[in-house]
Amino acid sequence: MNDLYDDPWLYDLQHDGYRDDLGFYRRLAEDQAGPVLELGAGSGRVSVALAAAGSPVVAVEPHPAMRARARERLAELALERPALVARVRLLDADARSLDLRERFALVVAPFNTLMHFERLEEQDAVLRSAREHLAPGGAFACDVFSPRFAGDGVVRVESEWSGMTGSAADLFLWQHHDPVRQLLVSHHRLDEVDSEGRLHSRRARLRQRYYQRFELLRALRAAGFQDVRCYGDFERGPVLPTSAVWAFVARG
């Protein structure tokens, strides 16, 4: 089965309309007033939003298909918004071994980017790299989902996506949770019926190593960050039992 990042069309179908985090990262970029380094840029959703707000962005993405989709997105904007496109530099690089020899006012790892690194040494390497790329007075920000799971292996229909492809379609999602490894594997299947009544399926899988809140706080401090703060939403509210996301801001 393909990784979800090998199918940017299916990825964007589900996530391109997500806007909850954009204000959080835009406000941070405005406060820091300098260039931004984005780790795990994906198909460019956050990069474009930051560049649209006036920030120069270096966007790092190691997956070829996602990087190609980000380039397509920028190409689509080139005629109408050339200044925006000029502010985005898209790089083929890995956050674990990044060495750009540049410093940034803000480094971000949005939309669960840190959850793609399963081993502790990988997580430590990414956080160290993020800190090493901060300019004096710089900030690092990231978000991860809080680990609350539905029934293991239970199939649900993501009904809001039905018909978005221009034909009869259903998107199915089911997840398998390994609490020992703190690993969540999500399976995505899009079933479409064409005009002749034939069924076509696209399938992809996503692996995410989730965090406990204090675990990530400790990891950030161990990487050398200071004044590490965790919020329970993108409006910088307190962490609550009902918080679906944890948003972190740390200083170098």
Image (spheres, rainbow, N blue to C red):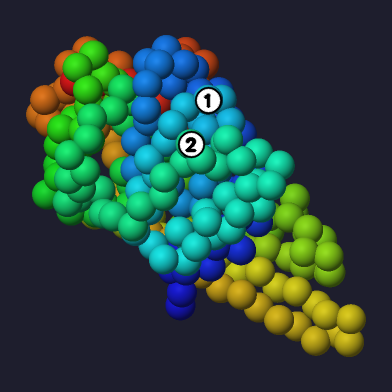
Residue 6 falls left or right of residue 209: right
- The residue located at (52%, 56%) in the rendering is 71
- Find disc 1 in the rendering and name its residue: 54
Quadrant in the picture for residue 201: bottom right
Residue 160 falls left or right of residue 38: right
Residue sitting nearer the eye, 148 or 143: 143
Quadrant in the picture for residue 32: top left
| Few, some or many residues within 10 Å of mark 1 (<14, 14–19, 20+) | some
The reply to whether the C-beta atoms of the residues labelled 2 and 1 are less than 8 Å apart is yes
Name the quarter where the C terminus is drawn. Answer: top left
- The residue located at (83%, 80%) in the rendering is 194
Q: Which mark is residue 87?
A: 2
Residue sitting nearer the eye, 42 or 148: 42
Picture layout, residue 104 above or below residue 178: above
Q: Which amino acid type corresponds to the residue marked 2 in the rendered image?
A: Arg
Position of residue 149 measured from the top left corner of the image (x, y, whole percent):
46, 45
Residue 233 falls left or right of residue 144: right
- Inspect this view and state whether residue 101 appears: yes
Position of residue 69 measured from the top left corner of the image (x, y, whole percent):
54, 60
Residue sitting nearer the eye, 149 or 68: 68
Counting residues from the start of the chain, the first of labels 2 and 1 encountered is 1
